[in-house]
Amino acid sequence: MLPHVIGSSIHYIVVFLLVGTVTAEMYLLKLTPSVENVRVIARADTGYGIAAVLVLLSGASGVMHSGKGAAYYFHNGAFHAAITFFILAGLLSIAPTVRFIRWKKAANSSGALPSAEQWKAQRKWVHLQLGLIAAIAVCMSMMARGVGSFG
């Protein structure tokens, strides 16, 4: 019982870390581009990537070692939807990540900054990621209550 509680707790903590880092990105993208803001958003995005990997690993561990058994998860449409949304959020994060890395390199080497329009344009990507994260939460709540079970 205790290992399940610890595993679930770790999973929830890294989920909160993921939400916190993407929320930090949203906040930073409301600020004016500066060398410091470019560096901070690149660090936040790195944290987001690390958190996403940890969410995936801790979630996979929970599926394989939970009291419900893997079959419970694999036979639930809400679980499959949540995984799909997770993958989509990851794919949507690629373009901003590449931009943040380029901006950081340019800011560090020459002090060049993205234009205000380029900076602001990244907000839509982060908004989409946050929307998908919210959809994942809905799917997981449904799954925990047996909604979407088949087979």
Image (cartoon, helix red, strand yellow):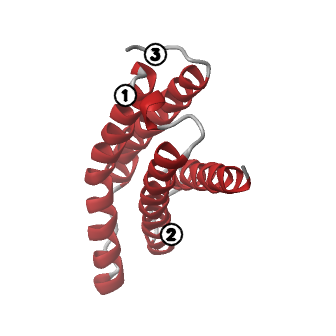
Q: Position of residue 59 (x, y in %)?
A: 49, 48
Q: Amino acid at mark 2?
A: Val
Quarter of the image for residue 73 reads top left
Q: Amino acid at mark 3?
A: Ser
Q: Which mark is residue 149?
A: 3
Q: Nearer the viewer, mark 3 or mark 2?
A: 3
Q: Position of residue 65 (x, y in %)?
A: 52, 48
| Nearer-the-camera pick, 74 or 47 | 74
Residue at 61% x, 19% y: name it: 145
Quarter holding the C terminus is top left
Question: Disc 3, disc 2: CB below 8 Å?
Answer: no
Left or right: 8 in relation to 150: right
Q: Position of residue 49 (x, y in %)?
A: 41, 60
Residue at position x 34%, y 68% in the image = 113
Q: Pointers 3 and 1 in contact (CB under 8 A)?
A: no
Reading the image, the residue beneath label 2 is 40
Image marks 1 and 2: residues in contact by CB distance under 8 Å: no
Badge 1 or badge 2: first in the primary sequence: 2
Q: Which residue is mark 1?
A: 80
Indicate which disc, 3 or 2, sits on the residue closer to the N terminus.
Answer: 2
Instruction: Using the numbered discs, state the Cα–Cα distance from disc 3 to disc 2 in whole angstroms.
Output: 42 Å
Secondary structure beneath label 1: helix
The mark nearer the N terminus, 3 or 1, is 1
Expressed as whole percent of the image width and height from the top left, the position of residue 135 reads: 48, 27
Badge 2 marks a residue whose secondary structure is helix
